[in-house]
Image (cartoon, grey):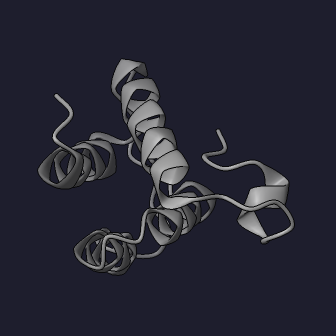
């Protein structure tokens, strides 16, 4: 699950803020429609994903949706986003700033 394409992630193709905001909304809808993972996967700490969420929130506060996409991509890379404890926190954060429900 990628939010921005490979070229957009690394600056090879320009991605504007409106396009990135649209991609965050698409990511929200796609994540909301996925099933949660029933088993707990330990990545060293139960709260290891929280610092990544803080980065997403900070990017939202700056209204930098390209940065938001990058930080959400980090969560996808480092954590199992389909666990309820992570999935619903990410969804709530996106709802707070994008207004999706």
The residue at the point 37 percent across, 36 percent down is 28
Residue 45 in the image, given as x and y percentages of width and height:
37, 75
Residue 40 in the image, given as x and y percentages of width and height:
38, 46
Viewer-proximal residue, 87 or 28? Answer: 28
Q: Is residue 29 above or below residue 95?
A: above
The residue at the point 46 percent across, 75 percent down is 44
Residue 13 in the image, given as x and y percentages of width and height:
82, 60
Q: Is residue 82 left or right of residue 77?
A: left
Q: Is residue 80 visible?
A: no
Instruction: State which quadrant residue 14 falls in.
Output: bottom right
Q: Is residue 48 left or right of residue 101?
A: right
Q: Is residue 100 left or right of residue 15?
A: left
Residue 100 in the image, given as x and y percentages of width and height:
21, 34
The residue at the point 23 percent across, 47 percent down is 98
Q: Is residue 92 above or below residue 73?
A: above
Label tally? 0
Q: Is residue 40 visible?
A: yes
Q: Is residue 87 above or below residue 35?
A: below
Viewer-proximal residue, 84 or 31? Answer: 31
Which image quarter is the C terminus in? Answer: top left
Which image quarter is the N terminus in? Answer: top right
The residue at the point 84 percent across, 58 percent down is 7
Q: Is residue 101 left or right of residue 80?
A: left
């Amino acid at each position: 699950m990628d939010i921005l394409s490979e070229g957009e992630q690394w600056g090879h193709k320009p991605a504007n803020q409106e396009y990135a905001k649209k991609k965050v909304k698409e990511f929200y809808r796609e994540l909301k429609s996925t099933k949660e993972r029933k088993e707990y996967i330990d990545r060293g700490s139960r709260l290891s994903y929280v610092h990544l969420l803080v980065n997403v929130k900070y990017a939202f506060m700056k209204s930098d949706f390209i940065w938001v996409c990058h930080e959400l991509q980090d969560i996808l890379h480092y954590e199992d986003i389909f666990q309820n404890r992570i999935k619903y926190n990410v969804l709530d954060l996106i709802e707070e700033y994008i207004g999706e429900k």
